[in-house]
Amino acid sequence: MSAQAAVLITGASTGIGAVYADRFAARGHDLVLVARDQARMEELAARLRERDGVSVDILRADLASRADLAQVESRLVEDTRIGVLVNNAGASSPGTFVEQGPEAVGGIVDLNVTALARLAAAVGPRFAREGRGAIVNIGSVVGLAPEFGMSVYGATKAFVLYLSQALHLELGPKGVYVQAVLPGATRTEIWARAGKDVNALPAVMEAGDLVDAALVGYDRRETVTIPPLPDAQQWADFDAARFAMFANFGQSQPAQRYREAREAV
Ligand code: NAP
């Protein structure tokens, strides 16, 4: 068993989550891997145990199932070796919002929103009590851009960004680090699972490069890490524009443009 905090990673059977497992194991952290595909996690776990001498546990769970999710929540509450939660599992679905329909839309929200928020809610109080710990939430640049045409998926990722920023404000002063990672298009199975050809995209990042950059942001204790964004000032300007509105939100009267319209009726 490592002296460092153990890391629980959701969606660790492949893609970005499997790379997080690889990188945290290389740093000497014990791991708890969570996903549905037991065989893939066994294979990864065997490789990392052998290579890095870390302990790797596997928790098979469908995070869209409340019963399975409850088991992962309990593990986060009870296993005080776990000091880092990587909330990575996420999915989209083929088609537009209208084509997807209520089942698929609900499934995306169950995984990308409900599971992510419940796992953070399960572990957050313990981390706050202990005055340490880290929660890494994997969002997406799609959460900033409805124009990409991935309606409910993008909306769930906007939720991930908001929740991360809010938890940073709430838990940061208690010693808990919260990071939102916003990847752009990254070469993983998520594209094929959503019925899209990753090779048709104009630019795609390799998952290893994405996670290595995200971990630079992690080590710097960034709240929001956007690995593909060349100019960090653009994010700072965007955030500053949001801040500039705050002073104007508290008003006793609607804005003049709405009053004018009502007075004209
Ligand atoms: P991926 O290759 O499809 O991997 C998704 C992981 O989540 C897999 O380990 C999968 O494992 C797990 N998962 C899916 N549904 C699950 C469920 N119901 N219960 C438990 N685990 C489940 O996708 P990825 O690209 O690595 O995605 C990782 C995160 O990055 C996601 O949150 C995604 O939204 C985000 N992201 C990806 C990109 C991109 O271009 N790749 C861009 C921006 C953001 P099992 O199938 O074994 O359960």
Image: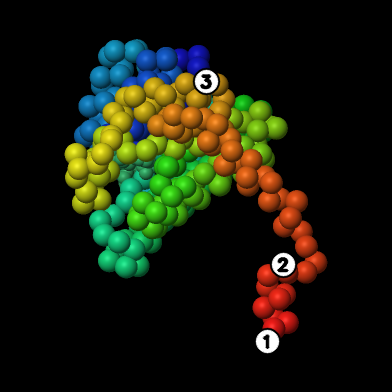
- Tell me what residue is drawn at x 57 percent, y 25 percent: 221
Cβ atoms under marks 3 and 2 closer than 8 Å: no
Q: Which quadrant does the C terminus fall into? A: bottom right
- Residue furthest to the right in view is 252
Q: Secondary structure at mark 3?
A: helix
Is 71 situated left or right of 41 in this image?
right
| Residue 76 image offset from top left, x and y in percent | 50, 37
Q: Nearer the viewer, residue 209 or 239?
A: 239
Task: State which tag comes first along the sequence, 2 or 1.
Answer: 2
Q: Quadrant of ligand 1?
A: top left
Q: Nearer the viewer, residue 67 or 14?
A: 14
Q: Which mark is residue 243?
A: none
Q: How many marks?
A: 3
Is residue 85 visible to us here? Answer: no
Residue type of the residue flagged with mark 1: Val
Residue type of the residue flagged with mark 2: Ala
Provide the residue designation for mark 1: 265
Q: How far apart are the alpha carbons under marks 2 and 1?
A: 16 Å
Residue type of the residue flagged with mark 3: Asp
| Residue 172 image offset from top left, x and y in percent | 65, 33
**Relative to 26, does residue 9 appear above or below in the rendering?**
below
Report whether the residue tagged 3 is closer than 8 Å to ligand 1.
no
Is 61 situated left or right of 233 in this image?
left
Is 136 situated left or right of 38 in this image?
right
- Tell me what residue is drawn at x 45 percent, y 23 percent: 215
Q: Which mark is residue 219?
A: 3
* Label 1: few (<14), some (14–19) or many (≥20) C-alpha neighbours in 10 Å: few
Task: State which tag comes first along the sequence, 3 or 1.
Answer: 3
Provide the residue designation for mark 2: 255
**Relative to 49, does residue 17 appear above or below in the rendering?**
below
Q: Secondary structure at mark 1?
A: loop
Q: Nearer the viewer, residue 119 or 67?
A: 119
